[in-house]
Image: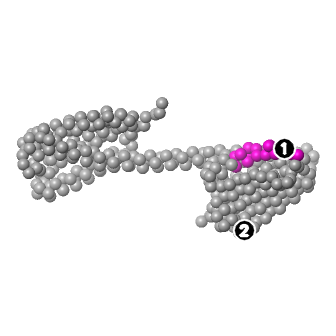
Amino acid sequence: MNEIRKLNFDIKLQNHIWFWGTYFTLNFLRWGAYFNDYPYSFKSNLIEFSLHIPLVYFNLFVLVPRYVLKQKYINYTFSLLASLFAIYLLKTALTYYIISENIWPEANREYHPFEINHIVAVCIGELYVLAMASSVYLTLTWLRERERNRSLRENQFKIKLKYLENQIQPHFFFNTLNNLYALSLESSDKVPNVIIKLSDLMEYVLYDVKGTKFVPLIKEINYIQNYIEIEKLRFENVEVTINLESDIEDIDVPPLIFISLVENAFKHGSLNNRNLKIKINCKVVDNKLLDFEIINNFVISQNLNSKGGIGLTNTKKRLKLIYKNNFSLKQTTKLNYYIIRLQIPIHDED
């Protein structure tokens, strides 16, 4: 069963007072000037507004939630007509006993209660006020709801993105610590250098990109180069080439968005492959897209179904959150080379 929405009295009371006070004042001055009779205009508007206001809120907070939001339009119509008839009786009686026995002084002739022209005039007047006041209220409520929903979506986006980023970072350091552990078992003299490089990487992750939605691309490239240096200490025969074909100094990217792609090349390209070759190409296409391509060789008999672990999966999810469908991430094989190509819109630091 669908949850029935309700209208909430979430606009400050002082704003309601300002609205009705301003409306009353303008109406009082308008009709006072029109008839050149301000005392009559004041008494007449006092009676009318004492009926306008309850009718408006009765419609908004009783009739609309009970009938309109539940799609019971016939019930709403009859309830509104009954409310208008009650308003007509009250207005006619109050006018007769407080202002004048002529219940419609504004008309060109004297009217008596329940004459059709008088009933229509009163009902149209009430419907006019009801429509105007309800439109103002519902518009303000809609704007507040839109802002609230936008804020909620933004918070959900940040929470989900933060969750994915927190997954990516432990995943990366877990792999690096495994590498360090393997070297320590061999009592390798490379261990101190690995620790220093790892310290640089952790400083970048923990301080440089913390709470940052975009970072300069050049810093991401430096981060990747540090990671590559760690992997070079672990592997004997690895050749990595980085080609920066365009000016990238003024381009910003999401932090740690490329590292999983690079990790993927080392992880799967090194399986049963003593001579690992990795090529990284980064360029700008038509001043609109950043093209980031990683190519690594692999043994043709290798099972590629294992490609794309948690790091690559989370990268796809992050890209979807940040760019929606405005990005391209393709994985292909050509001969004994595995290629990952990512294209994202350019985000300038300005």
Dot 1: element: loop
In three-dimensional space, the C-alpha distance between marks 1 and 2, rounded to whole angstroms, equals 35 Å
Residue drawn 11% across the image and 50% down it: 106
Q: Is residue 157 left or right of residue 40?
A: right
Which of the two labelled residues, at mark 1 and mark 2, occupies the earlier sequence position?
A: 2
Three-letter amino acid code of the residue under disc 1: Asn
Relative vertical location of residue 204 with respect to residue 184 in this rendering, above or below: below
Q: Which residues are magenta?
A: 301-315
Q: Residues within 10 Å of mark 1 (few under 14, many from 20)?
A: few
Q: Residue at x 79, y 46 (%)?
A: 307
Using the rendered view, name the quadrant where residue 337 is placed.
bottom right
Any magenta on residue 4? no
Q: Which residue is mark 1?
A: 303
Task: Identify the coloring.
Answer: one colour
Residue designated by label 2: 246
> Quick check: can you spot residue 231?
no
Is residue 183 placed above or below 80 in the rendered structure? below
Assign a secondary structure to mark 2.
loop
Front position in the image: 90 or 162: 90
| Place of residue 226 in the rendered image (x, y in percent of width and height, measured from the top left) | 79, 57
Residue 187 x, y percent position in the rendering: 92, 47
Mark in the foreground, 1 or 2: 1
- Residue furthest to the bottom: 247
- Side (left or right) of 137 relative to 311: left
User: Looking at the picture, how far across and down is residue 90, in whole percent?
Assistant: 17, 37
Residue 70, image x, y percentages: 39, 34
